[in-house]
Structure formats: C-alpha cells, structure tokens
Image (cartoon, helix red, strand yellow):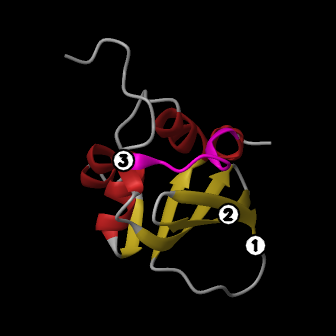
Amino acid sequence: MTILETFIAGIREQPQPLLANTTGKLLFEIRDHDETTRQLISIDKGLVEIEPVEGNVEADAIVRAEQSLSEAIAQGRANAMAAMLRGELYVEGDAELLMDFQRIFPGPDDAR
C-alpha cells in the first residue's frame, strides 16, 4: 500500500471540512522506475475515496509524478504547486482541484 493510499484510507470515513465545497475526480499516475500505478481519488463535498484503476477512466484532472514526490506531498514534505512550477509534477485538466486536495495533507513540521 502506498503512502497516498494509507493516508486516504485513514480519512475516508470522516468528512474533510477543508474540502466541503469541493467535488471532482483526480487520476494520479505515479511512476516508480519502470512501473506506473494509477489511482482515482474521488472528492464529493468533503468525502474522499480512492481506488486503483486500469484502462480508461474519466477524471477532472490527471496528475503525473514520481513515487518519491507523491509520498513527500502526502507526508507534507513537499508542496504540489511548487513541484508543478518546477516541472516535477504534471497536471492536465483542473489544476485547482489538485490545489484544493493538497489542503488536507499535513504541512511541514517547521512551517511558520
């Protein structure tokens, strides 16, 4: 189980107030060397679900990143917007949905 899957599993039973006004689907394509895993994250007014996918699926945004970067974002050690600006993370579609989703991840321990 990836860190992203573990994080989502921990919050899926409880509504997320920071996403109360957010609805959409993010398809994460996470690369680990030569292997790519695809996970669909559905957000429905604060409720979050995750499922592995194969084949074609509709999503509001597609997010492509390396495994290590996706783990760093899920752990609060990296920022998705900063990674996108550096070209380390690629988003097709509704980038604002990713920015909304990022708000539920922990922040860095030394943030002030």
Classify residue 21 by image quadrant.
bottom left
Pick the residue in front: 68 or 34.
68
Give the left or right position of residue 20, taking residue 75 as reference: left
Give the left or right position of residue 25, taking residue 108 as reference: right
Q: What is the span of residues highlighted in magenta in the rendered image? A: 10-17
User: Residue 44 magenta-drawn?
Assistant: no
Q: Could you tell me if the residues under marks 2 and 1 are in contact, i.e. CB atoms within 8 Å?
A: yes
- Residue type, mark 2 in image: Gln
Q: Looking at the image, which residue is at 40% across and 48% down?
A: 17
Q: Is residue 13 above or below residue 47?
A: above
The dot on residue 39 is: 2
The spot of residue 41 in percent (x, y) is: 60, 64
Q: Which residue is mark 1?
A: 53
User: How many residues crowd around disc 1 within 10 Å: few (fewer than 14), some, or many (20 or more)?
Assistant: some
Give the left or right position of residue 82, taking residue 98 as reference: left
**Among the two numbered marks 3 and 1 on one chain, the one whose residue lies closer to the N terminus:** 1
What separation in Å lies between label 3 and label 1 (alpha carbons)?
A: 22 Å
> Which part of the image, by quadrant, shows the N terminus?
top right
Pick the residue in front: 76 or 18.
18
Q: Which residue is mark 3?
A: 80
Q: Looking at the image, which residue is at 62% across and 56% down?
A: 30
Q: Is residue 92 above or below residue 78?
A: below
- Residue type, mark 1 in image: Val
Q: Is residue 11 visible?
A: yes
User: Residue 16 magenta-drawn?
Assistant: yes
The spot of residue 57 in percent (x, y) is: 65, 85
**Magenta highlight: main SS:** loop
